[in-house]
Amino acid sequence: MTTRSMPMVGGETATIAANEVESNVVDLRGGSLCALLVPAAMSNTTITFKAGVVPATMLPVHDTTNSAVSITCGTAEAAFYPLDPADFVGARYVQVVSGGPEVAERVFTLSVRAL
């Protein structure tokens, strides 16, 4: 019997403070973002991302077609949103960006896959 090895997945948290748009900068620790767990009661339905190799220079994440990597989420219930890990390969740090200010603190769980 052959056993196939799968990359380990770990969780990190990102928090958008009340009345803010961007989360804290999260260190992916050599992994790649592969999913986002969005909390319930979001004020905005669009989530995008910033990424970088140093925390001081975070830039919007675009895919290979030059489209912003984004999620359109519901505002009423928490949900799990898979992402393409290829969009985050090479990024050491990532931020979650809401489409507008959140009326209360929002805590996201980032699913990070080892490369």
Image (spheres, helix red, strand yellow):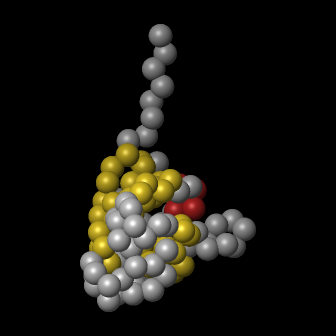
Q: Residue, x 35% and y 71% (percent of image)?
A: 41
User: Residue farthest to the front?
Assistant: 76
Residue drawn at (38%, 62%), measured in percent from left and top?
A: 77
Viewer-side residue, 80 vs 5: 80
Occupied quadrant, residue 112: bottom left
Q: Is residue 113 above or below residue 16?
A: above
Residue that lies at the very extreme toward the right in this rendered image: 65
Left or right placement of residue 111 versus residue 72 in this view: left
Q: Residue at x 45, y 30 (%)?
A: 5
**In front of the other: 110 or 93:** 110
Q: Give coordinates of residue 102: x percent, y percent.
A: 36, 83
Q: For this rendering, which residue is in front, 2 or 71?
A: 71
Residue 87 placed where, x, y %? 57, 62
Residue 31 can be seen in this image: no
Q: Answer above or below: position of 85 versus 93.
A: above
Residue at the image point whose x is 48% and y is 25% from the top: 4
Q: How many marks?
A: 0
Q: Quadrant of residue 65?
A: bottom right
Between 18 and 10, the one lying in front of the other is 18
Residue 74 position in % (x across, y down)? 47, 67
Residue 84 visible somewhere in the drawing: yes
Please provide percent x and percent y for residue 27.
Answer: 34, 66
